[in-house]
Amino acid sequence: MPELPEVEVVRRSLQSFINGLKIKKVTIFNRNLRYKIKRNFERIIEHQKIIFIKRRSKFLLLGLENNFTILIHLGMTGKIFISKENLKKILKTSFYFDNEINKKHNHFIIQFNNKVKLIYNDVRKFGFIKLISPNHRHLNNHLQNLGPEPLNSEFNYIYLNKKIRNIKKNTKSLLMDQKIVSGLGNIYVNEILNLSSVNPKKISKNLSPLETKKIIRNTKITLKKAISLGGSSIRDFKGVYGNNGNFQQNFMVYNRSDQMCKKPGCRGLIKKIYISNRSTFYCLKCQK
Ligand SMILES: [Zn+2]
């Protein structure tokens, strides 16, 4: 499931491929994604120029000249492909690698001027595309209750320390809560807690100032590293699919149950448990 770094990688590649282009035609094969694509969708976005491409949490926001904003969420399996006729190739903008596009799962195509196409492919159809009308972005129900972006300076020690004082949740659930900090999901929270030597079950109000500071710092480090590893593979999207270095090969604990902790000098055993039905991996030695 794409988390913040994957969505940021997609945003950056969309920025280089479609920013400033004009939408020529929209073809929808399947309107029934997580939310039904409204009837007037094509009419509102056709002949509009893309004026910005932003990300908020795991949402992509494509600004149009008429001040509407296209909101895209990739859900579980959403992927965006760009095709450029002059290259006769499909460029993938997704973080994850796979070797083929199954056309059966292409749900819509946005065609731009100069023969660029954006193809949305989603096997499980949990993703969606919606329009936000002009000046309603701050009121949008997907965006309005989100906590700060973890890479922004508002996500800092003073903020988190204040938040955790009244919360009886365990630390893993705290970091997964989009109202506290937006965009973190299961994989990265597991990683952040290992790097911070914090037990995922620890009640967050019992976190020491040092632990809280470590969590902030490791959140930023982990996300930046994941973005840069995904980002570095963007350059290879032109033709090479395969196992370039990406963050999944760098996991400290995620999917590594019964293996040894990678932290220098630790050698503790990684255990898998479930917290709120989500698989949770932690080191029995350094995350006591
Ligand atoms: Zn360890």
Image (cartoon, helix red, strand yellow):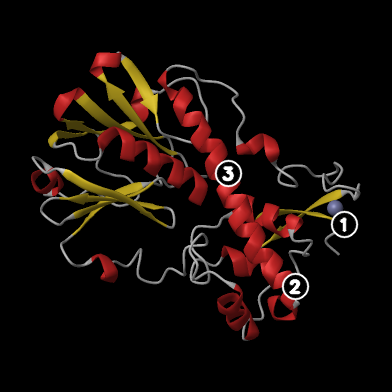
Cα distance between the residues tagged 3 and 2: 24 Å
On screen, 239 above or below 128?
Answer: above
Q: Nearer the viewer, residue 169 or 238?
A: 238
Q: Position of residue 268 (x, y in %)?
A: 90, 50
Evaluate whether residue 96 shows in this view.
Answer: no
Numbered label tally: 3
Tag 3 residue = 226
At 32% from the left edge and 28% from the top edge, which residue is drawn? 82
Label at residue 284: 1
At 60% from the left edge and 34% from the top edge, which residue is drawn? 246
- What kind of residue is marked 1? Leu
On screen, 149 above or below 31?
Answer: below
Q: Position of residue 167 (x, y in %)?
A: 62, 81
Cα distance between the residues tagged 2 and 1: 20 Å
- For disc 2, the neighbor class at 10 Å (few under 14, some 14 to 19, many from 20) is few
- What kind of residue is marked 2? Leu
At 43% from the left edge and 53% from the top edge, which residue is drawn? 58
